[in-house]
Amino acid sequence: MTIGIDKIAFYTPKYVLDLIELAKVRGDEPEKYTIGIGQDKQSVVPNYEDIVTMGANAASQIIDDTDRQLIDSVILATESGIDNSKSGAIYIQRLLNLSEFTRTIELKQACYAGTYGLMQARDYVAAHPGRRVLVIASDIARYGLATPGEVTQGAGAIAMIISDNPKIASINTDSVYMSAERADFWRPLDRTQALVDGHLSTDIYKEMFLTLWQRYCTKTQQTISDFSGFAFHLPYTKMGKKALDEVLDQATAEQQVNLMEKLKASQQLSRQVGNIYTGSVYLSLLSLLSYSDKLQSGEKIAIFSYGSGAEAELYSITLQENFTEYVPRKSVKQLLEGRQKLSVSEYEAVFNSQLFDSHVNVKSEAVSGVTQFQFLGWQNGERIYV
């Protein structure tokens, strides 16, 4: 049975910050951001958006009546949880009008959880042919104003429907994975912003990629020539190049050119959105599928998923026949082009307007006359959505 990604969609809030303008205000050279880090813009989250609204807004683009009949599991991967007890997935189930006879669960392991959700969905469909699983990776990367991590902020959600006979890509059963307790990134329960050792995180990312690549090649007897491209977790786009550089010498000169072209294609969306944590590697995949015109049905793509703390997985997907017809290039382009640019001062005001205190009844700045799902605010300690 072939199981994999049948549909995929992306959503990000309507506000965007130009990082060249941010660099000038922060007293940095713009090239430090656009070349050194590899970021051009980042999405900015208004206080009426969160992981629930972004996840539901992404999933609503791909769910139809047939999906509502066949989806009986919703898996939400996030490290921006809204509640210590209640799963954000259960809000999404209601907003999307899915059956009450549905499992709803939230997963957490830094940026890696989206991949674990995908693997659980694949295994579930294998055991229950004909059923479908909705996997959502939704996150807000928030480090603070004028902090070293500010340039790697961002927000967005990737939604995928996992089924048999997928239209886009099959998920191959060739995973290798590893975990090791490391203090490179974490966020205690009493903090709204993460603690991070950027240099250590980069070192662990590269170390785990190389370790898993060697293990993968030994396990599968495949080489770099078996892959048309890579999709990497991209906390910032330069990170993907750092990883690929570790194995690029295993390819021929012609293959190296091809792989670097594909890497550039995989970075395009992240350059415009920023870091979306659990969804980052799948934004990279969507970008590769959207911006590379050299991919062919039957080709394999290697996917490297990493989550600080730390856990990683390397596996492959195989592109299906006519997959290009089901990649939402046009809608993603329209979404990004339709965003409203904020000045740095406007961005700072939005950043500081988030509603974290559940003890106060307060309304968000939700707007009327829109079709997107929104967080309306707090009422008696409860999050209200529409």
Image (spheres, rainbow, N blue to C red):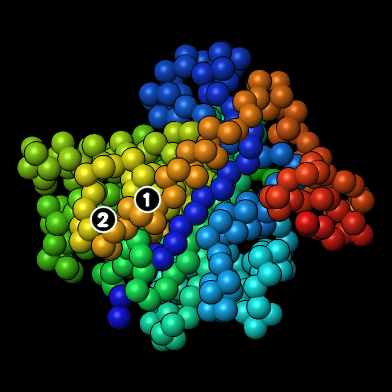
Examine the image and state in which quarter residue 379 appears.
bottom right
Quadrant location, the N terminus = bottom left
Instruction: Please name the residue shown 30% across and 75% down the image.
Output: 2
Examine the image and state in which quarter residue 130 appears.
bottom left
Q: Residue 142's x, y, as percent?
A: 62, 40
**CB-based contact (under 8 Å), mark 1 and mark 2:** yes
Instruction: Please name the residue shown 26% across and 42% down the image.
Output: 293
Q: CA distance from mark 1 to mark 2?
A: 9 Å
Q: Residue 101's x, y, as percent?
A: 65, 83
User: What's the mark number on residue 285?
Assistant: 1
User: What's the mark number on residue 301?
Assistant: 2
Name the residue type under label 1.
Leu
Quadrant location, the C terminus = bottom right
Q: Residue 276's x, y, as percent?
A: 52, 46
Horizontally, residue 224 falls left or right of residue 238, namely left
For the residue labelled by badge 2, is the local secondary structure a helix, a strand or a loop? strand
Label 1 neighbour load within 10 Å: few <14, some 14-19, many 20+? many
In the rendered image, the vertical position of residue 167 relative to residue 69, given as above or below: above
Horizontally, residue 186 falls left or right of residue 92, namely left
For the residue labelled by badge 1, is the local secondary structure a helix, a strand or a loop? helix
Q: Residue 197's x, y, as percent?
A: 49, 40
Horizontally, residue 183 falls left or right of residue 93, namely left
